[in-house]
Amino acid sequence: MDVEELINYYGYPAESHTIQTEDGYLLTLHRIPHGKAGPTGGHRPVVFLQHAILLSSAAWVITGPDDGLAFILADAGYDVWMGNCRGNTYSRGHISKPPDSMRYWDFSWHEMARYDLTAGINYALKKAHRRKLTYVGHATGANMFYIMCSLRPEYNSRIDAQFSLAPDAIFDTHLEARSGDGHFIRDEIVRFNGYPSESHSVQTEDGYLLTLHRIPHGKAGPTDGDRPAVFLQHAIMLSSAAWVINGPNDGLAFLLADAGYDVWLGNSRGNTYSIGHIDKSPSSFVYWDFSMHEMAKYDFPAEIDYILEWTKQEKLTFIGHSTGANMFYIMCSLRPEYNSKIDAHISMAPDAILTPGLSAKESLERAIRLLGASMLTVEGNEILTNSRGRELNYPSECLVDPLSPLCQSNFFILSGFQDNDFDNRTWTMVEANFPAGTSYKTILHYSQCVLKEKYAEMDYGVFNYVKYKNRPPPEYNLTMVNVPVYFYYSKNDDISTKDEVDILQKTFPQAQEAFEVPSETFTHLDFLWGKNVKEQLYDDLLKLVNTIQGKSESGLSDTNTAAHETVTTPHDGDIVTSNEPIQTENEHLTSENELLENPQENQSKESE
């Protein structure tokens, strides 16, 4: 029995209305125009009832006429309209996108708020010949109303009152808000915790538009003297949010800012914050034609140049986590002139690519963790965006309870699982930001490197002869990484290994010490979000950065076990290049809310 049949079953009038949104979705509105006793004299004010996500208009009637809000309001003399958001049982149509296509499902509650609610309100007002209505929203049905008013403020004038029935808890001690599609807004997290936050737009040599986030100083304000620049680079599939979502007590970006550093957070092309290009549309295949190679060759140099120019400094400290460290090595191989712009590099859990002794099966399993789990979330060349990754690759249970064991197990297949080293409070915020998006080609390039145990350019098979004039793709020359490099690794990390660090130490001309995190359960993602990451890792890392910058005469923490001493010495002579790095076109970007233009109102006047 559907909603209309159920309403009729109880003796009430029922109507179904099909409406079209601005972006072509076909929605069903259900209506109870009056109570069981028939139309009452005088006006019947319009009340619009909006269900939460995963529900439908049935939510308002399934408890029957004695307890169902829709029936009670109708009997009280109101004209009751019930919305159905795109994709639910009653709103599964589109003018051109079939529901069995991935394109149909490329929406979130951002689009529901921006298009569905506005279309439903417009239609109900027009049909009832009213100028305003009362909106009642349950759970996320209330939250989406707030988002609608943020995106389409002209709709405030069409609402006489809004009733929020148990709005979902969005605000938290760690954040100020979420954006409409479920991402935590990185700038707002920083500002909510009392720190200054800036966004800067950087253009790469090949036209990609990246966002750099900056915390220029700590919570207490600017400190006297110089504030050395520190650049933090996330791994693939993450974003700058990785460094701040666990709050000021445990977030490395906050800790560095409070320690007197000018902290800059990178965002690689194609992720949540770096989705632009000067002439390539993100909806095109050509936009997503990049891999780790282009990130290392163009993204890192553009960001480093921008930071040094903005701060008027000659060098910065580069800290990379996971593939954020691996891509730094590739940058130095491709652009060795950038060695002179780095005073030190700290590799936190660099991914194991060169590790010897793994069987083909083990190597394949490591690669498939990323490649295979990602295949379900590919559309075109785009892969693992936040909303699509969670919708298609996460169980539906995760949308309701992201802390469920099933949801967490699905997430940790990418990183190794040890729940006693991961805070559930932080997990909810991680789930809202991961994955942050990248290209399919990036995942494929990474997988090729893992399978072949080589740092090499993309393998195009027989087309290598066309691209490289050679069958095997060129390997990156890691001996060109000619800056002091420090390493951190852990025993329980099956993505980054001690063997890998040993090989890198013997390869880099200025390799320094490697430190093992003093924990038997510390995993790959605990380097960012572990419960005790400050005590187990960051306190020691801050001392190391202070030592590099000459801020402290004390040595490194005694709590960590040094795995190796410095193993090699620099090559004779310095690297000399004849060409200066190409300057990028930089533009300072201040955050603004982009609002839609007010649609023309074609409403009938309120009838007497």
Image (tube, rainbow, N blue to C red):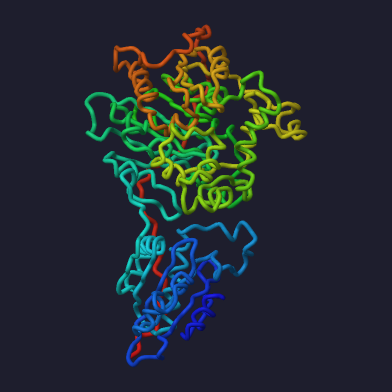
Task: Using the rendered view, name the quadrant where residue 515 is placed.
Answer: top left
Q: Out of 207 and 251, give the one closest to the viewer.
A: 251
In the rendered view, does 190 fall on the left or right side of 332? Answer: left
Q: Is 230 placed above or below 392 here?
A: above
Q: Out of 71 and 262, give the one closest to the viewer.
A: 71
| Observer able to see residue 587 | yes
Task: Using the rendered view, name the quadrant where residue 221 is placed.
Answer: top left
Find the residue positioned furthest to the right.
462
Q: How many marks?
A: 0
Q: Quadrant of the C terminus?
A: bottom left
In the rendered view, does 587 fall on the left or right side of 335? Answer: left
Q: Which residue is drawn at 35% across and 80% down?
A: 131
In the rendered view, does 348 fall on the left or right side of 308? Answer: right
Question: Could you tell me residue 273's position as x and y percent?
Answer: 46, 44
Q: In which quarter of the image is the N terminus?
A: bottom right
Q: Which residue is drawn at 59% across and 69% down?
A: 93
Question: Could you tell me residue 119's position as x and y percent?
Answer: 46, 72
Q: Out of 440 and 397, give the one closest to the viewer.
A: 397
Q: Is 232 placed above or below 554 here?
A: below
